[in-house]
Amino acid sequence: MHQGIMKAWLDSSHLSGANSTYVEEMYEAYQEDPQSVSDDWRAVFDNLPHANGATADVPEAAHSKVREYFRSLALEGRHKSATRMTDPDVDAKQVKVLQMINAHRFRGHQNANLDPLGLWKREAVSELDPAFHGLTSEDMEREFNTGSFAHGGDTMQLRDLVKALKATYCGSIGAEYMHITDTEEKRWIQQRLEPSLGRANYDKSAKTRILEGLNAAEGMEKYLGAKFPGAKRFSLEGGDALVPMMREIIYRGGEAGTKEIVVGMAHRGRLNLLVNVLGKKPSELFDEFAGKHSDVLNGSGDVKYHQGFSSDFETPGGNVHLALAFNPSHLEIVNPVVMGSVRARLDRRGCDTGLQVMPITIHGDSAIAGQGIVQETFNMSQTRAFKVGGSIRIVVNNQVGFTTNLTEDTRSTEYCTDIAKMVQAPIFHVNADDPEAVAFVAQVAVDYRNAFKRDVVIDLVCYRRHGHNEADEPSATQPLMYAKIKKHPTPRKIYADRLIEESTLGADEVTSMINDYRDALDQGDCVVKEWRPMTLHSVDWTPYINREWDEDYPAAMSLERLENLAQKISYVPENHKLQSRVAKIYKDRVSMANGEKLLDWGFAETLAYASILEDKKRVRITGQDSGRGTFFHRHAVLHNQNDATAYLPLRQVTDDQGPIDISDSVLSEASVLAFEYGYATAEPGGLTIWEAQFGDFANCAQVVIDQFLSSGEQKWGRLCGLTMLLPHGYEGQGPEHSSARLERFLQLCANHNMQVCVPSTPAQVYHMLRRQVVRPMRRPLVVMSPKSLLRHPLAVSSLEELASGTFQNVIAEIDEQDTSKVDRVVFCSGKVYFELLEKRRKENVTNVALVRVEQLYPFPHEDMDKILAQYQHVKDFVWCQEEPQNQGAWYCSQHHFWSAIPAGAQLTYAGREASAAPACGYPGLHAQQQESLINSALKL
Ligand code: AMP
């Protein structure tokens, strides 16, 4: 135990000056009170030798002795085959040498040559100077043990060691990785960086490949600049190395077994990647610049620098499918979308290591530091429901945010990448003017991700040759930077000159490379020689294209099959001890399965899932409390009270059922909804659900709703069958827990882009969920889901209603009424219906009929017409809602109600008065308002 802890400590320790002090301080604290230090440190100190040579409760060793002891242990630990030096002076120097090695591992990046423009003002790090460690020029000639430094032999002349350290840690790569606690990972990185001194030994063909990448990057931008002067293209120039880097990543991934790569990026450099990496035909891009567009998607389209693209790319390890995700201008929000898409592809492939599908997200330097969604995706990266085996995150760090100066105005951290440290991701800063270092880092990043299944960051430190876009004048705000940029040679030129100088290529070869590329652009055909027609993506979307919401679909199911399913999902093994309230719910479910009780909401909803699973389709549900359900109704995940193990009855439907994942999500709406959007846009076969804890929390994901869910099909032709369950209902819980902001969804509805439903019975939720999968249309389903209705005695259904019914878009009056006596028809949705019904029954009102609109959008005109046929004599129609007048469905849907009622009839409103807040905070006031709106609807 003692040895193990010591070894662990030694492995993870770093004996820099600062840390010795830290150890000393800690030791002092430990002497005062052993409990004041962490368990690990206590274990180390407990096992120290003591002044009297014996272990005591609190050791009494003097500080100097403790320090000496640490040093000797360090020496022993790092002692390889070399003979131990005995001279105390040499011993002390040896410790200093080890400290200096560690100082480079920790802080070398702070003095690395990262900025191509040389504008960064960074203070010299004294610990990187041998003199700081007391090492003199005489020592430079002496041999020292190199400890774990993985270059050369066990010993090195100090002069060579210093050179090797500078080359590895202070050259074009600034490796930040010592914040990682896992020793194996740190050692792995050292083994990759140190033996080769931080660079790969590229042969002529590899170097030519790198130059080709730069040549293409620059050639493309120059061509566009000349052909379409002033047109926005968000040029990559300055960050040209992104092209060879991406190609390197794809090659490396392909060799390791990656089958698909999903890329997310904002607009900078996007056109360049589309043409030079993904293989989009330049002629198509030029057409877009010229204002032409293909009408394939039938939608309204999007600007060219938001477009996605898919292709296959040949690598020596096999073809890799590439998908560049479509994205809006809202920076960084595409990242969780990419992760969701990757997870769907991994799930489909049955790959839980992440190896077969790799996400690459490309960030801007200001955005990665500024946008909270980045933190959310890092936080997701290792969680059960959202992990994807790590992602490669690249920052195109052009050192300016539109016009904003980076370090002073856009962040409070040293690097823009500091957020990545929260998940202990290694961060490789690299000078983009050294493309070989860039390619090397790309390979290391892919290998690291595949080895440890964790995120890794490449900070491509570059510059932006033009303004934010090409019509912009950057020197107005960044005068010194742009004076420098004007004189700075392009990355292609720098590298080409280097290859010519070292005789790898002749000047004529370099020139013909430029000409060949320009000729290829003139031809307009694909310029990526590895491009292959798409064969690798595993889903056929054609069955889902051009489908409509009102298509007939097979809704009926035999009663026998349903009864069988009901039995299966209400069974819990005897040794799985349930909490008493949960046990009662499952006891009731058994009665429901046996036909002794009508079905409640939770059971009907679970039956919908079970039937989908039995059809071998996938069900995925995430949300903050989805396993149990915010309101204690679902209990799809049962927690054993004895050992906390989980049991999912829905996993026991049949031997060959579809997979089911019901997971409680990270406490975020934006990233989770975006992730599920990404999942559902890559997986049309099953049912994907995101559930909000309370409906209004979807506010925090408004970008995803506006920019993706409601408009993705129209802009990009990307279908998405995601279901959103948003608890909604006025129950006196105050402004924040009442409304899922129905009005906002209705306001976004057009072109049949999504469905907005308010199911009011268990049978309705069952049919609504099944319909979403069985019917081939794939469009978002927004559900105002219930809270108190989950347990309302009138909100029950029979198994027969499930077996033979279908989703009713409108539900007609259910009480027997003399229709000729009806002089008012009240339309409503959701919980308020039951309040109207109860009051009407109580007050014996016979002249008012209640019609429930269960699907507010697309508005079911035909169904409504059929129901209203019997009320053609009625002149008085009312829309009743619980929400204030400026909210709910009144303003957004009344044109539909007007078009449904007979000519000459009136439509009026019964509901709360307009209000700035969604609901009042006082329960008494709530009850008063509720009573008044019910009375007004019923003419009481
Ligand atoms: P991907 O695997 O994302 O590269 O997609 C491959 C192809 O499948 C695309 O080029 C589209 O034709 C089609 N496709 C992928 N996702 C969708 C979607 N959400 N909606 C419609 N078609 C899609």
Image (cartoon, helix red, strand yellow):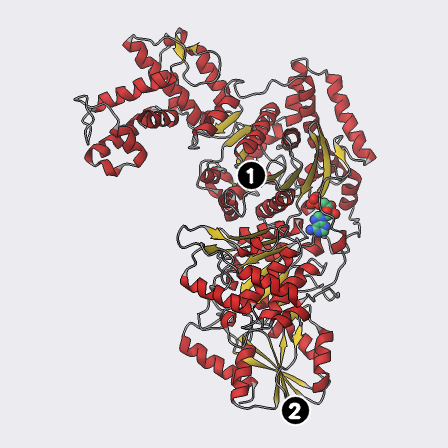
Disc 2, SS: loop
Q: Do residues under tags 2 and 1 come within 8 Å of each other at their CB atoms?
A: no
Q: Which mark is residue 626?
A: none
Q: Is mark 1 within 8 Å of ligand 1?
A: no
Q: Position of residue 835 (x, y in %)?
A: 52, 80
Q: Quadrant of residue 222?
A: top right
Image position of 168 with respect to 476: above or below? above
Judging from the image, what secondary structure is the residue with disc 1 in?
loop
Q: Is residue 370 above or below residue 693?
A: above
Q: What x and y, as percent, mark residue 647?
A: 49, 53
For disc 2, the marked residue is 818
Q: Nearer the viewer, mark 2 or mark 1?
A: 2
* Residue 303 visible in the displayed image: no
Q: Residues within 10 Å of mark 2 (few under 14, many from 20)?
A: few
Residue 86, percent from left and from top: 30, 8
Badge 1 is on which residue? 389
